[in-house]
Image (spheres, grey):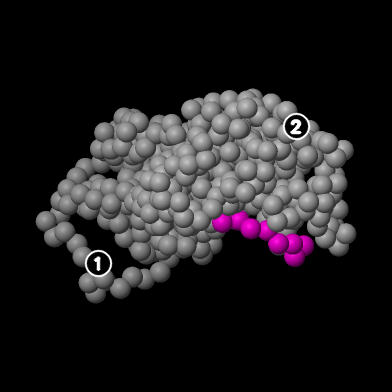
């Protein structure tokens, strides 16, 4: 039958002997529904959100975020999805492929028997790498192929079966060719393709890196498909920190865009440029053998989303103005804390702190330690800095420190303290690098300035962006690993 291999027909698959497409449709719909439900475990468990939601992954820790099931977007019902024009002409392969372009194709135009055939292919293709290419080779009419891809996309399974398809050259060729034709005809849209990319937390295989899917997408050479793939993967990585392995596939896809296409894409999605820059900087630090700490609970994309939430950003910027600092500086510090400095233990302690149970140190989204906060408050009052009176009235009860608002205000006080120390010792806070160094001090301390010393040997070294031991480091890393990895956040918030 034109298959790329022979298949064992000895009962490998369970079939619906009644010949009805209804059962197969129910199976696929049930699988999709189960796969799209992500658990949110508030105390110590994995915090997961589906990529169709607005990313309220820091449950109870931030204000103003929309939860799934309230105002978040929901997965579409494949049986009530957009109407797609079908082709009423002869679709048999004997008539030969129609010349492109051809109208959008819909699986709903097929007979019940044909729909069952297509549903069976999609079901089997999730387990059998030859099922999809075998079908495509047996159905050379691109309209038939487009209808299959429309069905898979409607059920949210197209990226999954593409990622699991065979890698042999003939299989890859026909899969790539068919995907491109489905997009060109409008049978599959970028939004449908993006929506079908799901995280491991939504029912896909654990630990998948989507390298095969990236290879297929890149081989199409189509910027629409490449950008839809990148956006879908980034949205998944944003909400599922266990899927950060996919960033390698994202980088491969971005490299396939021309410089002009990539620049235009980043203008539309600047958060993706920031996420990928942080990934690159982590690789730079590893290659240089330099230490850095990046906790794995929350991601760069989620950190940007939390800070950019209108209610959150309004409050962060109000606190920045109250304490006389650049809003972009405080925004970058909050994002860096979310991404690089929060783990599951912190989430547990924050939940306890909001109930008045003060265990540990560094509660809230900004994780300010009490001794550093006390020193910062005294410094602001002694030097008559903006907000000194408000700092003196700061509520130090654990419930306030663990709240979003209380934690952000504490961060603003500490950042104002370090910013003034930096300037008084001849330093600047103008560039993203300068701001990132302030977060480096915020996290690791400054000898002679912070309680217990820290990662900068003196106030002068801190002022001039020299972390301890940088005499042995390449010049590009003089500010320290914390500053180097966080600079993209400050670049982002200074520009957006």
Q: Which residues are magenta?
A: 288-295
Q: Secondary structure at mark 1?
A: loop
Report the predominant secondary structure element of the magenta stretch. loop
Residue 409, position as x, y percentages in the image = 57, 34
Q: Residue at label 1? A: 13
Indicate left or right for 418 with 399 as reference: right
Q: Position of residue 238 (x, y in %)?
A: 51, 46
On the question of residue 373 being in view, the answer is yes
Q: Is residue 233 found left or right of 438 in the rendered image?
A: left
Residue at screen point 19% across, 45% down: 112
Q: Is residue 301 visible?
A: no
> How much space separates mark 1 and mark 2, taking CA atoms?
77 Å
Task: Find residue 383 and name its label.
Answer: 2
Q: Nearer the viewer, residue 15 or 327?
A: 327
Q: Nearer the viewer, mark 1 or mark 2?
A: 2
**Earlier residue among tags 1 and 2:** 1
């Amino acid at each position: 039958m034109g298959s790329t291999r022979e298949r064992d027909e000895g009962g490998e698959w369970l079939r619906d002997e009644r010949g009805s497409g209804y059962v197969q449709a129910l199976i696929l719909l049930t699988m999709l529904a189960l796969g799209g439900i992500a658990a949110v475990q508030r105390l110590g468990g994995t915090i997961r959100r589906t990529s169709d939601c607005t990313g309220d992954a820091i449950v109870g820790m931030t204000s103003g975020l929309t939860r799934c099931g309230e105002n978040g977007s929901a997965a579409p019902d494949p049986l009530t999805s957009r109407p797609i024009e079908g082709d009423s002409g002869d679709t048999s392969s004997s008539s030969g492929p129609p010349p492109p372009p051809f109208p959008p194709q819909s699986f709903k135009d097929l007979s019940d028997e044909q729909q069952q055939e297509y549903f069976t292919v999609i079901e089997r293709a999730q387990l059998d790498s030859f099922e999809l290419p075998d079908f495509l080779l047996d159905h050379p009419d691109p309209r038939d192929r487009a209808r299959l891809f429309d069905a898979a996309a409607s059920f949210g399974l197209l990226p999954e079966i593409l990622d699991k398809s065979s890698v042999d050259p003939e299989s890859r060729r026909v899969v790539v060719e068919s995907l491109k034709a489905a997009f060109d005809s409008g049978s599959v849209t970028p939004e449908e393709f993006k929506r079908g990319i799901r995280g491991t937390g939504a029912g896909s295989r654990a630990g998948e890196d989507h390298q095969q899917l990236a290879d297929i997408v890149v081989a199409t050479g189509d910027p629409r498909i490449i950008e839809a793939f990148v956006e879908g993967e980034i949205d998944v990585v944003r909400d599922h920190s266990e899927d950060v392995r996919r960033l390698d596939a994202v980088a491969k896809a971005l490299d396939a865009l021309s410089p002009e296409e990539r620049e235009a894409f980043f203008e539309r999605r600047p958060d993706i440029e920031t996420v990928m820059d942080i990934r690159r900087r982590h690789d730079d630090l590893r290659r240089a053998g330099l230490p850095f700490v990046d906790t794995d609970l929350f991601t760069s994309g989620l950190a940007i989303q939390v800070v950019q939430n209108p209610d959150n950003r309004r409050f962060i910027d109000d606190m920045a103005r109250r304490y006389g600092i650049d809003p972009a500086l405080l925004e970058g510090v909050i994002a860096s804390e979310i991404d690089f400095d929060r783990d599951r233990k912190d989430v547990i302690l924050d939940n306890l702190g909001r109930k008045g149970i003060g265990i540990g140190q560094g509660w809230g989204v900004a994780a300010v330690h009490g001794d550093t906060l006390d020193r910062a408050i005294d410094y602001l009052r002694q030097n008559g800095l903006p907000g000194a009176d408000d700092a003196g009235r700061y509520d130090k009860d654990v419930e306030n420190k663990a709240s979003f608002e209380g934690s952000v205000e504490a961060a603003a006080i500490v950042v104002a303290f370090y910013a003034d120390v930096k300037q008084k010792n001849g330093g600047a806070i103008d560039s993203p690098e300068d701001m990132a160094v302030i977060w480096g001090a915020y996290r690791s301390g400054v000898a002679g300035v912070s309680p217990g010393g820290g990662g900068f040997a003196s106030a002068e070294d801190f002022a001039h962006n020299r972390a301890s031991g940088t005499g042995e480091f390449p010049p590009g890393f003089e500010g320290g690993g914390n500053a180097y990895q966080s600079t993209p956040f400050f670049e982002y918030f200074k520009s957006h």
